[in-house]
Image: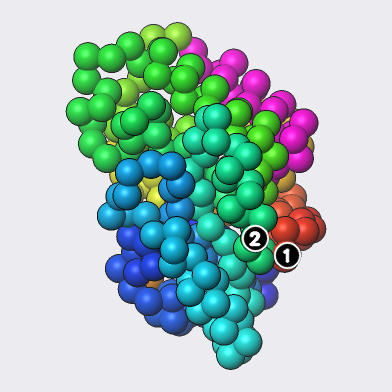
Amino acid sequence: MIYRTDYHIHTTFSDGRSAPDDYITAASAAGLSEIGFSEHLSLFKEKQEWCMNPDNVSSYTGYIENLKKNVCGITVRTGLEVDFINGKEQEIGTFLDKLNLDYRIGSVHYLGEKTVDLGPEFYEGKNIDKLYESYFEQVMAAADSRLFDIIGHCDLIRIYGFRPATDPEPHYRKLAECLKKNNVAFELNTNGRNRPIADFYPDRRYLHIFCEEKVPVCVNSDAHFPARVGQYFDEAYNLLRDTGFTEMAVFEGRNRKMVSF
Ligand SMILES: [Zn+2]
Ligand SMILES: [Zn+2]
């Protein structure tokens, strides 16, 4: 069996539609070797319905730890998808250090007080080149913070298809170098196929840059309901193979090892 993992899953603990158990059933049916849960956690922002209440984090991790002990045939991992907030690195670190996680996904959803993925209105009338620049800057700051093991959907700013006037390739080059320097993995996030951009994150045209820089990769679905666990994974792994990747990152207790695929 080919070893496959899916580390980016949202359940009813944040904005997903089903309980973790249902995703495990789906992951087993999809032939995955590991499933990891990664609820949204956004500290220092107004409470949002898509995020878990920070007070519920320990009941969430407790629930997943219990599943780990009782589920057979598939390895269960505990993670979080944490919003990176510039200037709050220390506080986020203090909060996360108390938790026993297999990995931390660091994601940028906010530019300032607004999220980039809750509607195209955010982009209207704005300078898209500047938005790209700010977004990549935030993602690099997330990597530089060394708080995270994996950077989530590193070019989410593409979501609604607003294109910059200038070639964005230098952003990808700088980002890949930054990830490598900080020893942080990135994900090939297949959920972009379900969004207006209808493509994976990051943009497949620049995937070779991450390969050249030898940045560790994971393939993740970012599923918000069970039917999307492992979605488009054949295509994603083929794309990685065609690009030159031969192995992927697997996490346990925040230790990374590389597994061939
Ligand atoms: Zn996200
Ligand atoms: Zn997510």
Mark 2: amino acid: Lys
Residue 18 falls in which quadrant of the image?
bottom left
Q: Is residue 198 magenta?
A: no
Residue 255 falls in which quadrant of the image?
bottom right
User: Which residue lies at the image location 41% right of the left edge and 38% below the top edge?
Assistant: 109
Label ID, residue 43: none
- Residue 242 on image: x %, y %: 64, 43
Which residues fall within the magenta stretch? 167-186
- Residue 226 on image: x %, y %: 38, 71
Q: How many marks?
A: 2
In the visual, does 204 lie left or right of 46?
Answer: right
Residue 62 position (above or below residue 158):
below
Where the N terminus falls, by quadrant? bottom right
Disc 1: which residue: 253
- Is the CB of the residue bearing disc 2 within 8 angstroms of ligand 2? no
How crowded is the residue under tag 2: few (<14 C-alpha within 10 Å), some, or many (20+)?
Answer: few
Mark 1: amino acid: Gly
Camera-nearest label, 1 or 2 = 2
Residue 218 position (above or below residue 138):
below
| Prevailing SS of the magenta stretch | helix
- Residue 86 on image: x %, y %: 53, 30
Tell me the element at label 1: loop
- Residue 122 on image: x %, y %: 25, 27
Disc 2: which residue: 98
| Residue 232 in view here | no
Residue 220 position (above or below residue 62):
above
In the visual, does 144 lie left or right of 9?
Answer: right
